[in-house]
């Protein structure tokens, strides 16, 4: 296909299911998430 | 906002505000780059002209592609608007809870590394070891100020923390004794130069330390040039066998062999690959943090060299992964599906708010890089944070507080960068360290390319192997 979308976490959705604060302090993008 | 780049034969489109990543062919790459600024008739004319030798590019195939692009836009996976600035403001107003401490258990060191940001572990002050009583008070402070947070982190740092190892062990025991009563779960980490690693330390660390950072700069000649004993001898031959034994007993997991590269080895890839060839699979290699005039400091002339090293590293990692001899490089460990939520990306490292450094005498600083700078003293473990104005300044320091970050495609990956680096580069924690930003953007491009490549069928080969 001309465009192949790679599965990623939806940042908009993470406004609803994120924010628990239990992740490690910190790189940031390579920190695992609650998830 | 979108960001497009090509690397090692992969054409990638990142939709910045949704986090979506797309692997595209050349035609889609060109169409997406012009889609928002060119009317359809003109876009069709230009694509038919550019791809006139490609029989697959026709008016109907272009219209099909336009429909795909519009569909992705409708799904909010392409050309997504930035709606997060108000979230950042709300997040700033949240209650401050501490969830991590960097315990400077030893302001002294048994190595004399010339580039050490901590001035050979002393942080511009006298040699000092943290007492058990001060460390215990720090843990009590953390428990008391952590709110509903269950996971608490404590890093044993220095200097060289193994010079105060007995206190470290007693503090772990104290924290464990309070876990059930408080409902907290402590995760301890340790950063060591390895000189004092022995079987007793290994056994304890592998039982109690969630992660361990082992400092090694690469090949013997690189490592020994800068990481010397006080008598001026290199430390490579002392530490490498210890690290290998330590990692083997640890089961090869939850550690990082972490190096620093400087102007001397801006072409750092041979040093990193040497670590992999020693059998280490969890690797990190970081640009030196020092004053611009320091002989170790990276220069503008080094910049393209370092960027090329990052690109070659991504290609080599892909090649080794497919040969069954893969290793991990910290900055390329992007977890595209289980990575951080938006709040985390806005809050960044949490220095000065969620994360504090504690000196051997119990003083609090925003992070380990501010220790020893009187203007950044925040309080102590007995009185708590008394400099609330400074805490509030750090609290408001999200990526949206920096004008320079406004149009940067990588801002939700770096979260605004390092406050200490910003201070040293610009004089303000709301400034940016532009050189570091440029390196960061290159690393993220390489990381995204690698993650995309690893998801492709094996017959897809990286186009430019090392």
Image: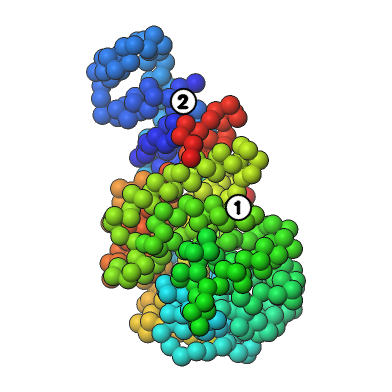
| Residue A19 or residue B160, whichever sits in front | B160
Q: Quadrant of residue B79?
A: top left
Q: Is residue B332 visible?
A: yes
Give the letter of the chain under mark 1: B
- Residue at x-position 37% and y-position 12%: B54
Mark 1 and mark 2 in contact (Cβ < 8 Å)?
Answer: no
- Residue at x-position 37% and y-position 36%: B4
Count of numbered tags:
2
Measured as percent of width and height from the top left, residue B407 is found at 30, 48
Image vertical order of residue B24 relative to residue B120, above or below = above
Q: Which mark is residue B415?
A: none
Label 1 Cα neighbours within 10 Å, binned few <14 / some 14-19 / many ≥20: few
Which residue is label 2 attached to?
A3
Label 2 Cα neighbours within 10 Å, binned few <14 / some 14-19 / many ≥20: many
Q: Quadrant of residue B279?
A: bottom right
| Residue B106 or residue B319, whichever sits in front | B319
Left or right of B33: which side holds B161? right
CA separation, marks 2 and 1?
A: 37 Å
Query: Which structural element holds mark 2?
Result: strand
- Residue at x-position 47% and y-position 52%: B269
Quarter occupied by the N terminus of chain B: top left
Measured as percent of width and height from the top left, residue B145 is found at 56, 76
Which residue is label 1 attached to?
B277
- Residue at x-position 33% and y-position 49%: B304
Image vertical order of residue B41 relative to residue B450, above or below = above
């Amino acid at each position: 296909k001309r465009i192949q979308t790679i599965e990623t976490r939806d940042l908009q959705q993470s406004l609803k299911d994120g924010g628990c604060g239990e992740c490690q302090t910190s790189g940031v993008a390579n920190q695992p998430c609650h998830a | 906002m979108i960001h497009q780049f090509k690397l090692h034969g992969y054409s990638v489109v990142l939709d910045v505000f949704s986090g979506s990543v797309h692997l595209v062919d050349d035609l889609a790459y060109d169409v997406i780059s012009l889609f928002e600024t060119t009317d359809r008739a003109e876009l069709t004319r230009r694509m038919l002209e550019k791809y006139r030798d490609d029989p697959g590019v026709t008016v109907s195939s272009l219209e099909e592609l336009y429909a795909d692009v519009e569909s992705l836009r409708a799904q909010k996976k392409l050309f997504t608007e930035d709606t997060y600035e108000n979230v950042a403001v709300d997040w700033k107003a949240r209650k401050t809870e501490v969830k991590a401490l960097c315990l400077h258990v030893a302001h002294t060191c048994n190595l004399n590394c010339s580039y050490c940001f901590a001035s050979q572990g002393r942080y511009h002050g006298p040699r000092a070891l943290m007492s058990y009583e001060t460390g215990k008070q720090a843990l009590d402070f953390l428990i008391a100020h952590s709110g509903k947070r269950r996971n608490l982190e404590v890093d044993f740092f220095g200097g060289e923390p193994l010079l105060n190892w007995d206190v470290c062990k007693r503090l772990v025991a104290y924290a464990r004794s309070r876990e059930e009563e408080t409902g907290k779960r402590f995760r301890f980490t340790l950063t060591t130069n390895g000189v004092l690693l022995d079987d007793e330390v290994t056994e304890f660390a592998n039982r109690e330390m969630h992660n361990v950072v082992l400092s090694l700069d690469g090949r013997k000649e690189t490592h020994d040039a800068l990481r010397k004993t006080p008598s001026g001898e290199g430390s490579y031959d002392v530490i490498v066998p210890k690290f290998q034994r330590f990692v083997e007993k640890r089961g090869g997991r939850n550690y990082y062999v972490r190096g620093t590269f400087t102007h001397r080895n801006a072409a750092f890839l041979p040093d990193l690959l040497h670590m992999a060839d020693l059998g280490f699979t969890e690797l990190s290699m970081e640009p030196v943090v020092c004053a611009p005039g320091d002989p170790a400091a990276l220069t503008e002339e080094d910049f393209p060299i370092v960027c090329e090293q990052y690109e070659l590293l991504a290609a080599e990692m892909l090649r080794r992964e497919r040969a069954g001899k893969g290793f991990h490089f910290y900055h390329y460990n992007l977890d595209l599906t289980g990575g951080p939520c938006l709040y985390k990306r806005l809050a960044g490292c949490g220095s000065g708010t969620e994360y504090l450094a504690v000196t051997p005498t119990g003083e609090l600083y925003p992070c380990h890089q501010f220790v020893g700078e009187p203007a950044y003293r925040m309080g102590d473990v007995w009185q708590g944070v008394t400099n609330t104005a400074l805490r509030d300044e750090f609290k408001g320091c999200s990526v949206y507080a920096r004008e320079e970050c406004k149009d940067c495609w990588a801002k939700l990956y770096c979260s605004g960068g390092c406050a200490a680096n910003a201070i040293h580069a610009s004089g303000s924690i709301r400034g940016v360290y532009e050189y570091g930003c440029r390196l960061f953007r290159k690393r993220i491009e390489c990381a995204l390319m690698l993650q995309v490549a690893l998801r492709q069928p094996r017959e897809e080969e990286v186009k430019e192997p090392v």
